[in-house]
Amino acid sequence: MTPPTTTTTPLLTQKFGPEITNYFSTSPLNRVSFLRSSNAFLSSALSHGKFLLLRDLEPLAGSESALAFVGYDSVRELIGNPFAGDGEEEVVKGYDSRVFVPTLVFLGLHEEEGGFEWVGEGGKYSGRPYFALDVTVKEKGEVCKKVQEEAVKVEGREFRNVRLDLNLVPGDAAIFAQARSLLDWNNRNQFCSACGARTVSANAGTKRVCPPTDKAFQKSLEDEPFQRPPCISRTGVHNIAFPRTDPTVIMAIINSTGDKLLLGRQRRWPKNFYSTLAGFCEPAESIEDAVRRETWEESGVRVGRVVIHSTQPWPYPANLMMGAIGEALPDGEEIVLKHDPELEDARWVGFAEVKSALEGCTGTPDGGKVGEEGQLRLPPSTAIAHQLLLAVVTGFHLAKL
């Protein structure tokens, strides 16, 4: 949700400075996650909804900077009303593996847009309902194609690979990030990781259930439901039933004298392109410990103090980038790439050169323009790596470390 505005400066802002928001974060939608299990709410919201269509996880866009949405009438033939029943129990009971059900995800309510109101036990909730729908051609191919063709008839609309430019306005970028991550998770979890049987979507696309029965193998309506093999996921609450987010550390490391930054590059990156180091958090590992471990494994540099800067959701497929700034130990600044040969090169770069490269960044993932031979290229401003480097060269480290 977007941080609420206040007329006074919050105490935390007075002490720590303004909140730092990164690209793909600060969604304009209220997810009202507690209503995902209410089919009455979802069924009512459906006809008032705006739908973001994704084909092969690429969204329908109206321009380079804006998503495009369609109304319920445009997708009615494809999805019908999947929330017409009483809820998860009825969906599971009526499961039939022969029936193709397009993946539909409820994203939330845009409270600044009117058109819908719901009164529940907790009060009144209003705003425009937003959904994401996978229209990739699978089964119901002709209907999916028809929805796609109708959607792009409006001039300027197309299914865009937004990762190539990262030019969506912030609110649309956050909506897309949520939609892509959840649709991708549903696509990857068509089969139960506990028993291998097919799963079914529940809770408006935010849960996968392994049904105990399957009507596809029921010989007649009079027969007892066909029982699938037992599965541990059907008893209790298990994390395999819900979307996962992979915690990842990304860090700007300064030297002990505070005038250079550690940058690295992978072999597959464009010429002269460098970035901050990054890596996945391991189980039972703090962010600070992960920063120290990953920095040493990739570069040989040993890090002392670590402070957390900001975070960024990254929907490829579902990472949470946890940005940090770390300070190398005075006797630990030697670069050694032999531990984990992930990097092609790593080097200490002066603040002035980094600042100049940041100023020349474009809006593409390749960062700065090629320019002169050997010119340093860095990630664009939409990447948290850029924001970490910018924070350091503009003095963040002096105030916080």
Image (cartoon, rainbow, N blue to C red):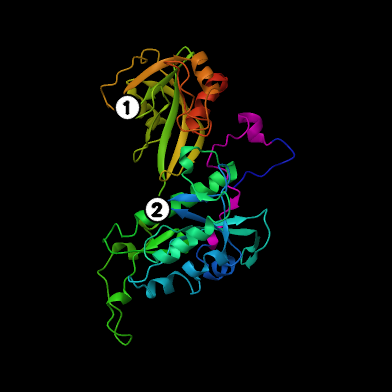
Residue 266, image x, y percentages: 34, 27
Amino acid type for the residue under numbered disc 1: Arg
Range covered by the magenta-colored residues: 10-35
Q: Is residue 216 left or right of residue 66?
A: left
Residue 228, image x, y percentages: 27, 71
Residue 158 shows in this picture: yes
Determine whether 214 is above or below 172 in the image.
below
Q: Is residue 29 magenta?
A: yes
In what element is the residue under mark 1?
Answer: loop
In what element is the residue under mark 2?
Answer: helix
Q: Which residue is the site of mark 1?
A: 267
Which residue is at the front of the view, 384 or 353? 353
Q: How would you rate the neighbour count of disc 1 (Cα within 10 Å): few for under 14, some for 14-19, many for 20 or more?
A: few
Determine whether 243 is above or below 394 in the image.
below
Which residue is at the front of the view, 218 or 66? 66
Label at residue 185: 2
- Total numbered labels placed on residues in the image: 2
Which residue is at the front of the view, 38 or 177? 177
Residue 256, image x, y percentages: 44, 14
Question: Looking at the image, which residue is at 55% across and 18% down?
Answer: 398
Residue 105 shows in this picture: no
Amino acid type for the residue under numbered disc 2: Trp
Q: Is residue 280 left or right of residue 219?
A: right
Residue extending furthest right? 7
Residue 58, image x, y percentages: 46, 49
Q: Is residue 120 magenta?
A: no
